[in-house]
Amino acid sequence: MHLVGIDIGGTKICVCVGDDQGNIIESRRLPTQELKGSENALPAIEQEIKKMLEEEKIDLSQIGAIGISSPGPISTKEGKMLKPPNLPGWENAPLIDFFKNAFQKKVMMNNDANAAALAEFQFGQFKGTSNLVYLTCSTGMGGGAVANGQLVQGASDTAAEVGHFVLDINGPKCPCGQHGCFEMYCGGAALAAKMKEEIAQNSIKTEVLTIAKGQIEQVDAACLIQALEKKDPYAQKVWDEYIVRLAQGIGVVLMNFNPEALILGTMAIHSKNLMLDPLKKLLPHFAWRENINACRIEASAIGDKISELSGLALAKQALLGQSHS
Ligand SMILES: [Zn+2]
C-alpha cells in the first residue's frame, strides 16, 4: 500500500509518495509564497499529487492514506490550521476536508514538530522506542513527544511545546508574548539576531562575520558552527551561553517526559559533538541522574528527509485507523 505525504513549510511545500516503511518513491516541491495563500495553494497541491501519481504510474486505488504536516497552531479536532504566524493567507485552512474531498482517502494532519516526532518513532534510528522526544533545534525550537507508544497531543494540540518553556522571566521578549522562552535562547533565528546585534554594537572581530563574507545580515547559526570549528573566541563564548540554555531546556524535557531517547534536529546534525559533548556534561545541573542515564541523546539520522517522512508518518497513522474524524 502506498501513502501520500504533504509537508507545508514557510518557504516550500513538499509532496511525496512512499510506503509505510518510510521508503520515498517520489518527492516534489512547490514554492509556498508564490502560491499566495491556501485558496490557491490547496488546489495546486492536489494537482501536483495527481500529476506525480500519474507520472509514477501509481493508481489512486493504491493509495491508502494521506498525511499532512502543517505549521502550528492547528486544531486537529476541526482538521484545520488556525493562525500560522509565518504563513499569511492560510488562516483557518481546512486541510482535512479539502484533501478528503479531493481524494476520498483517510487524511491525518498534525503540527510539524509532532509530525517529525512521529516520523522518528516510525522510521528513525530509535523507531519503536515507546518514550521519545524530538526537538527541531532549527530556526525555532519545536518539540514533539511520544509517551507509552502514543504521540502526546494535549487538550489544545499544544503538548510538548518545549520552545516556549520559560527559562527566565526577565529574558528577551518572545513573539508568543512571554519573556525568556527556550526558543529565544536556542532557536537558530534568535541566536542569529543576538550575534548580529552584539557584533554590530561592539564592532567585534570574529570568524563568524568573516564566514558571512563580512555581511552582518548574512550571520546565522551555520556561520557560528563553522567559526566554532576554527576555534574563534567570540563563537566559543556565544556557544557556551547557548549550551547552558540548551541544557536547561533539555533538563526540563528529561524531567517532564523521562524519555528513553532524545533526538535533536538541524543544529545537532550540523554541529554533532560540538553540541552533544558539552551538553551532556552540563545536564546533571538540570536533571536527575536516573533521567539522564535512562536517555540516549543523539542527532537525528533522518536529516533532510524529515519533510517527506513527517507526511508519510501521519499517513501511516491514518492508515492504522487513528484518523481524527
Ligand atoms: Zn514563546
Image: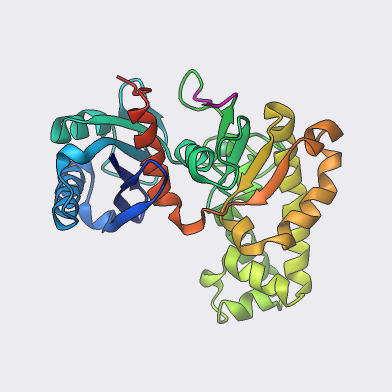
Quadrant containing ligand 1 reads top right
Query: In the image, is residue 88 part of the stretch drawn in magenta?
Result: no
Residue at x-position 35% and y-position 53%: 24
Check the image and report above or below for 241 versus 120.
below
Residue at x-position 38% and y-position 23%: 322
Residue 205 screen position, x and y as percent = 71, 78
Residue at x-position 63% and y-position 56%: 268
Residue 17, visible in the rendered structure: yes
Query: In the image, is residue 149 part of the stretch drawn in magenta?
Result: yes
As drawn, is 200 to the left or to the right of 47? right
- The quadrant holding residue 19 is top left
* Magenta-drawn stretch, dominant element (helix, strand or loop): loop
Residue 178, visible in the rendered structure: no
Residue 215 screen position, x and y as percent = 54, 77
- The quadrant holding residue 260 is top right
As drawn, is 123 to the left or to the right of 320? right
Q: Quadrant of the N terminus?
A: top left
According to the image, what is the colour scheme of the structure?
rainbow
- The quadrant holding residue 135 is top right
Residue 169 screen position, x and y as percent = 70, 35
Check the image and report above or below for 240 versus 20.
below
- The range drawn in magenta is 148-153
